[in-house]
Image (cartoon, coloured by chain):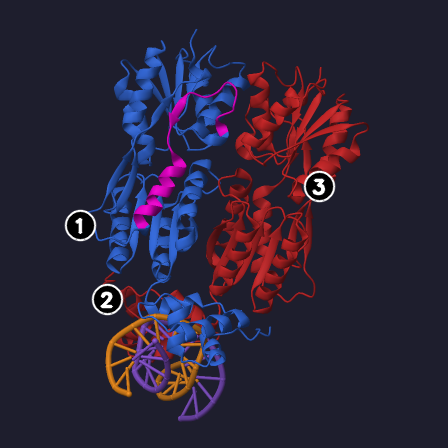
Chain colours: A red, B blue, C orange, D purple
DNA sequence: CTGTTAGCGCCTTCAC
DNA sequence: GTGAAGGCGCTAACAG
């Protein structure tokens, strides 16, 4: 209750009349145990002095910190913030979570991993689609290997390309499932707002979808954002081609943007054209018309990745856990 | 596990044939300068060996780390994730951001602040509404003072109650402005979905609104969430009272929930009842009907708070920056 | 069980 | 401009 001149373990030990080692053993969870009497005195002294262990000193002495890194493309994107919430809840009692926002830039990803190595972080969570750039993926895998070799853990949410434990959303299969469901609803001609060509998630969702429908599919690329979806939809509308009867945006955020573009042209889903998304972002479940999409258990994915990375058990090979997506048919594609 | 021979400054110094001190002076930015020749050798050796400074050791030797803590109620809430993105972008080159998710629990807030003290964090950002609980606020202010006294910086986004630099959204004034604008649109009777009674932001928005309209205002409390808004709206609809002609939810997320509840009862905004929110969450700007709300520059607020806390200049008193909200009238309250 | 004694990797006065 | 030496606060062998 008196934290003025940063009190150290030595102060606590002195106040309790015990050795540094004993004090250390009680304030943390050492394997060695301490007699009840001394234990009480140390605890009392620590409380009295308002002792707080210096995490940096602990990390240095023991060779590793309790830090867990969380690397995301963009924390403002609900996809990532929802996963982050899952991870945060799991990491919380076991360590501290440091956030690395890469703004989608692969070089920042690499850089952040280096920073985590500098922190002697216990583990790192790499969340988000890997890129189609093999050179970068190789570099990243090398960094991951280095980090792992130095005693850290790594888990990814995305594609299994890094030689680490990975939670893999089944983008391809789920997109195919969505395509079949839409076909089942009577949709016949499709356009896909495909996201950036550099992201594997975008590619997988596009290809899974395309492979599952018969006939031609028009493709419009663009950023994985609301504005990207809007712009791609505008290009579709301006293409001069006859309008397809359904439009699949490879994520919900783009789908929302696309719907806005349609509205601005006086078009309405599902009356004039069906619209489907992907992810089932919780905050977007209430838009009207409600969006047909593929549900991914985002928070659970974040939680699971954190569990994988926190688990100290020995393991022979990286663990890969596939997460199926669930097709959710809602109003935006309901064909009468 | 067998830790890889992690390279230290001593290794670099040896490889370069210089002293530890010299090596240290070049790899970081010391005030002392080093001859070009040796400087080059050290840099080369560091690159050769793949040296990465141990951040914990640096923090311990210099007494303070580059860590900045970011405390939010719920990172999955777009209000917080947007602010977090602003903060992350600003902190990035200067340090690392550690994320503290409190799930809205005041005791976690306190605990996380302690953790940041243990990290010898350079600064902490406390984002989110303070609570109406004066006892807790006092405790928190004491922790903040302790942290500050030990050399750390603190900035808050919310109410100016902690004796720290603060970015203050003008909840009360903006809510009043919204009320006047709605009245100007012809709305006469109002209900407010007021959020949790324990949060000052909720209280301020409610009171600002209520004070600016003439006549009675029905109030329905509930959590600051989508489900909270839904439930509060249901209570309103079930109250048996005649429906007000406009409903103000104190944040957008609740407003979305309320709109869902209305839809489920076959009601529609603005035809049957107007609906307004607060925050202008970017992801929600495209809902239909588009939501009348109060725009807060969330990302800029996060950025500004980070700037305040990163600025090493001396300051006499805490700086308080007020951020006005901008009323945005959209379809959800357009009265014909 | 408890205390003594080395460091962990780096920064930073001090001398030269 | 450069080097030598003393900690920073804590943990982890080793003795007792």
Residue B56 visible in the picture? yes
Q: Nearer the viewer, residue A66 or A163?
A: A163
For label 2, the crowd category at 10 Å Cα-Cα, with few meaning under 14, some 14 to 19 and many 20 or more, is few
- Considering every residue shown, the one lying at the far right of the view is A214
Q: Earlier in the sequence, mark 2 or mark 3?
A: 2
Indicate whether B57 appears above or below B104: below
Q: Secondary structure at mark 2?
A: loop
Q: Secondary structure at mark 1?
A: loop
Q: Secondary structure at mark 3?
A: helix
- Which image quadrant is residue B192 in? top left
User: Is B21 within the magenta?
Assistant: no
The disc label shown at residue A204, or none: 3
User: Is B303 within the magenta?
Assistant: yes
Give residue A3's position: percent from left, percent from top: 25, 62
Indicate whether B224 appears above or below A184: below
Residues rendered magenta in the picture: B284-309
Q: How far, Cα to Cα, is label 1 from label 2?
A: 22 Å
In this rendering, would A152 be left or right of A187?
Answer: left
In this rendering, would A67 be left or right of B219?
Answer: right
* Residue at 76% over, 33% down: A210
The verdict on a common chain for dots 2 and 3 is yes
| Residue assigned mark 2 | A5
Marks 2 and 1: in contact by CB < 8 Å?
A: no
Residue B209 visible in the picture? no
| Residue assigned mark 1 | B316
> Subunit of mark 3?
A
Q: How far, Cα to Cα, is label 2 from label 3?
A: 57 Å
For label 3, the crowd category at 10 Å Cα-Cα, with few meaning under 14, some 14 to 19 and many 20 or more, is many
> Subunit of mark 1?
B
In this rendering, would A189 be left or right of A113?
Answer: right
Mark 1 or mark 2: which is in front? 1
């Amino acid at each position: 209750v008196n934290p003025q001149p940063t009190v150290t373990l030595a102060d606590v030990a002195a106040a309790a009349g015990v050795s540094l080692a004993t004090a250390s053993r009680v304030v943390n969870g050492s394997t060695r145990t301490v007699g009840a009497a001394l234990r009480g005195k140390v605890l009392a002294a620590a409380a009295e002095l308002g002792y707080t262990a210096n995490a940096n000193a602990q990390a240095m002495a023991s060779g590793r910190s309790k830090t867990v890194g969380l690397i995301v493309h963009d924390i403002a994107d609900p996809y990532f913030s929802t996963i982050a919430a899952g991870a945060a809840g799991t990491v919380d009692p076991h360590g501290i979570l440091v956030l690395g926002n890469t703004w989608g830039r692969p070089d920042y990803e690499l850089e952040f991993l280096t920073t985590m190595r500098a922190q002697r972080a216990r583990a790192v969570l790499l969340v988000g689609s890997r890129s189609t750039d093999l050179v970068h993926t190789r570099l990243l895998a090398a960094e991951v290997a280095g980090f792992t070799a130095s005693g850290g853990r790594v888990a990814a949410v995305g594609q299994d390309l890094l030689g680490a434990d990975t939670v893999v959303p089944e983008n391809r299969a789920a997109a195919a499932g969505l395509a079949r469901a839409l076909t089942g609803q009577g949709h016949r001609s499709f356009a896909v707002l495909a996201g950036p060509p550099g992201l594997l998630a975008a590619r997988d969702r596009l290809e899974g979808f395309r492979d599952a429908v018969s006939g031609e599919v028009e493709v419009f690329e663009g950023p994985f954002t609301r504005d990207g979806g809007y712009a791609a939809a505008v290009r579709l509308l301006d293409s001069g081609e006859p309008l397809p009867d359904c439009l699949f945006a490879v994520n919900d955020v783009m789908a929302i943007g696309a719907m806005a573009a349609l509205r601005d042209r006086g078009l309405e889903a599902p009356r004039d054209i069906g619209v489907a998304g992907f992810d089932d972002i919780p905050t977007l479940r209430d838009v009207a018309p409600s969006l047909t999409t593929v549900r991914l258990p985002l928070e659970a994915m974040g939680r699971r990745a954190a569990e994988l990375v926190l688990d100290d058990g020995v393991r022979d090979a990286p663990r890969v856990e596939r997460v199926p997506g669930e097709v959710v048919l809602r109003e935006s594609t309901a064909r009468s």
